[in-house]
Image: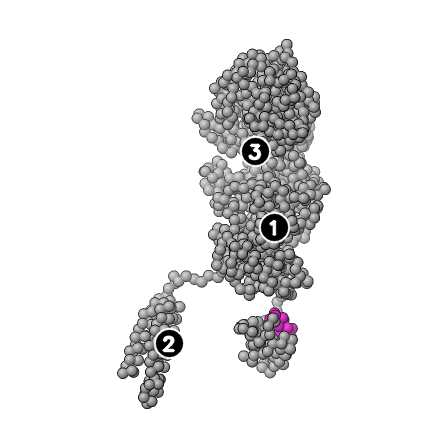
Amino acid sequence: MNIIVPYSWLKEFLETDANPQKIGECLSLSSQSVEKIISSGNDWLYDIEITTNRPDCLSVYGIARELSAILPKFGYKAKLKELKTPAKKDLSSEKSLPLEVKISQSSFCPRFTALIFDQVVIKPSPKVVQERLEKCGIRAINNVVDISNYLMLELGQPMHTFDYDKIKGAKMILRESAGGEKITTLDGQTRSLPDGTIIIEDGQERIIDLCGIMGGANSEVDQQTERVLLFIQTYDPVKIRQTCQKLSFRTDAASRFEKGVDSEGVLLAMGEAVKMLKQTAKAKIASRLFDFYPQPPKEKSVVLKLSLVEKIMGIEILSQEVEKVLQSLGFKIKNSKKEEKEFVVPHWRYGDINISEDLIEEFARIYGYHRLPSRLPPLAFNPTENSGSIEWANDTKEALKFWGFTETINYSMTSEESLKKFEIKPEDCLKINNALSDDWLYLRLSLIPSLLETAAKNQDEGLKIFELSNIYSPQGEHELPEENPMLTGLLTNEDFRKGKGIVEAILDELGIEHYEIKPYNLQKTFYGKTFNGAKLAEIILKNNSLGIFGEIKKEILTRFGLKGKVFIFDLDFKELTKYASSQKKYQSIPKYPPVIEDFSFVLPPRTYLGEIITAIKEIDLIIKSADLIDSFEDTRTLRVVYQDKNKTLNDQGVEKLREKIIKTVEEKFKAKIKGKK
Amino acid sequence: MDIQRLQNLKNQAISTILEAKSEKELEEIRIEFLGRQGEVTQLIKIIPSLPSDQKKTFGELINETKKIIEEAIVSQKNNFHRQIDREGWFDISIPGEKPPQGHLHLTTTAIKEISDIFQKIGFEKVIYPEVEWDWYAFEGLNMPNNHPARDEWETFFIKKLSHPKYGQAVLTPHTSSSQLREMARLGKPPVRMLSIGKCYRRQIDASHAPMFYQFEGLVVDEGINITHLKGTLDFFVKQYFGPQREARIRPFHFQFTEPSFEVDVSCIVCGGRGCKVCKQGWMELGGAGMVHPTVLKNGGFDPKKYTGFAFGWGVERVLMMKYKIDDIRLLFGSDLRFLKQF
């Protein structure tokens, strides 16, 4: 939460020789972050981000208190003006107007105070009050209402003023709301109250306050008001926070209450309010001080070992220095031994100081993080098994890049429409409960739709794109989904051989051997049906599918607004890395020259050439390769390389093998040799 | 007469061929002379009508002419390819033929740069779940339910997915959830973790995308202190942004570290003098701190014996600073006009 603190207001509580810029800089380095210093007439405004653990800094006085400890460390003088909590008797009149208070559960409201004033004169606030409120972004209303806002900014204690005569029966019942009650708040909005909201009702069962958030319109102070009830409390932060979340409504007061307001600071705020009401509204106290405070917090102290300070900060520290710094922040020494000290926590820090480490942070930040040296941690090694998939991912991406592919990263969340276009059932995907938009509702089960959408968006000739990202497969209602990395690529207007070549090159790059490329049979993936069935193949290794590739059906392409041919490969990257290897086998360079021969076969329809090539290679170890070099109508020309590592082959030497090749292909595949070239 | 005509034709053809400036022009010349309706071809057609004693000589002459013209065309074509003339001038300004070249996503490049830097000083790279239990993302990191600190992470929840012990499933809003997972995985120090992964928050504007990458460093061992954190951050900042850059830490608050810091780098635009982009010469990088004893305990480590530091921030945040990209949504928009720039 950010607050605005005017320099002129700050100076009322802090005597210092530091200039406005230095004050901002030092505050940032040792306490809360000053995001901007804005010039405003002859004044400066600090825009300060206050962290959630430091509600005590959400005020002008709180910032002045921090600075009084910080500035001396930077060599500036700094003296905080002390504020005295008034005695209770000074806040009471002898004769008291009546007020009946009932609090249904004391934990809702740790401290409840109220004081009634009469002879109140309503008029505009003094100019200085109006100006300060405006600088902080609050509109001035009248001298009574403004006091509550002014003191909230100055001391961090929110408060509220009621028109006493509008509280029917002079009765206040603080309780939880139930059964869908309503209140019209000061801003004119009627709000339905979630069950469990803390509210106050009066003697006629009218709800007059949405506690800690905003007062009710029915009891508001206006021009006719003569008697005012000043109301200062603290609330259970969790309760206030829950209500704000349910109502999606937050005020400056609520933002303070949900972080915790110091109950011990209530009377100080009351005293300042009384002074201002007397001064600016000529008000007279007309009641005793109503103060319900059943369980004041016990004194809190935290033990600190000097050795721990040194252990965390990494430098030697003098114990007097620690004492001095913590004292400047309001801590008191309870016990001081050589090695171990006990510090009493100031009441405004009860919420965030609990353990020794908290005290170390207090000391270290004031000491100055910028004064600590900078060292690299010593090297250490914890030998563990770690999957190499990250490194393989980098290598594969690099390879694809140099083959002309552009990497895309799409959102993991997708729309129902996109799933349906690709024939994925939305109910098979994980769904986000509080999605930002319908475009980002489900977690992806396949990367293909995202790539098709990317292709549609970038209607390029010869597009080559890929993505390597997780897909999320649900595993039941109490188990996290399986997050599986997929490597998915898309090529437009390329024929099947080119696409398949990329897949084979990826497998080569990963050093994967002994895989087979087969018609789509295992059907491990559920979306094989979106491919053109004839042009779809699967990579099989040890009865496991490593992925599929092929051309997407026309019908599906049309749904995505795509024309032409679209080739997709969709590889299970986790499976791939299981078999990946950077190990290369050395084979001695052949001493004797090879014999090379070309064979042209006329194949009968529906013959897989791949099987022929495998069959040829299996004939003899001397056959090193059989590669397709030409293809025309039904004829395929294969170039066969024979090589013997022990001798030079000649024509006669390969004659038997040649015959065997022809025989095998003709008999097994019913092909016809076309005359050897 | 026809022989003379043939001679003229040959000379004419050769001179036009030598003047030709492009392959297209050469092809036109070829068609003009040798095409089916070409002038040489027309002459061949008259052979049958010639007296028989002339047929042979004329035929040979025509063949010879045809061959000369063909050779001239080939030789001129080769000249084009070589871009070289008789004096040996060569056109080196001719565009080269590049091998295919694709593009890695900027985030991938940044992740690689970042991990290389940390791997140099002994960090091990790990990946942990993106769909995560509340306990790892919040509760175990010292952020109980209803803690106002949770507001800093606008979290996505998953429908119908919860664990009796670990609570609801969320899309992890930060890589800090890896801290507990890594400590549990290792079982004992030393920890030198660099976790990089996708994170998700319910926010969208020029500097926030609902999905982004974060990286998280975690070092736990005996004797780890704030000076080690400072050293690590200085090392990273100088390696990634350049040797002139400085890092600094300022107080901040996280529930899972104590003390907690915000990490700044001296402005990469103005070099620290102060400008429009930065705050008084500094730019915010991310968060850091000494691991909270409760988190060490939740990770299964003895907080009395071990101390540690952690830091983490958005990958896109640093790369946007480095490349001066003003809208994070460009990175995940799959617009190739953008992706192909890198």
Q: Nearer the viewer, residue A132 or B62?
A: B62
Q: Which quarter shows the N terminus of chain A?
A: top right
Residue A610 lies in the magenta stretch: yes
Q: Which residue is mark 3?
A: A368
Q: Is residue B306 above or below residue A159?
A: below
From the top left corner, tell me how far across and down residue A363 is, in percent: 61, 31
Label 2 crowd (10 A; few <14 / some 14-19 / many >=20):
few
Query: Residue visible at 59% across and 72% down?
Result: A605
Q: Is residue A607 above or below residue A269?
A: below
Q: Chain of mark 1?
A: A
Disc 3 or 1, which lies upstream in sequence?
3
Image mark for residue A378: none
In-image side of B252 versus B269 (left or right) = right
At 45% from the left and 40% from the top, the residue drawn is B270
Query: Residue B36's mark?
Result: 2
Decide: is A31 above or below A172.
below
Are the residues at dot 1 and dot 2 in contact (C-beta closer than 8 Å)? Answer: no
Q: Is residue B16 above or below residue A229?
A: below
Q: Quadrant of residue A200?
A: top right
Q: Horizontal and vertical percent for residue A158?
A: 59, 24
Residue type at mark 2 is Arg
Q: Amino acid at mark 3?
A: Gly
Q: Which residues are magenta?
A: A608-621
Q: Is residue A604 in view from this perspective?
A: yes
For mark 3, give the secondary structure. loop
Kindly identify the residue that appears in the image at 59 percent across and 42 percent down: A435
Identify the residue shown where x is 35% and y is 66%. B89
Alpha carbon distance from label 3 to label 1: 48 Å
- Which of discs 3 and 1 lies nearer the camera? The answer is 1
Q: Are marks 3 and 1 on the same chain?
A: yes
- Taking the view exactly as shown, the residue that stands out farthest to the right is B164
- Crowding near the residue tagged with mark 1, few <14, some 14–19, many ≥20 C-alpha atoms within 10 Å: many
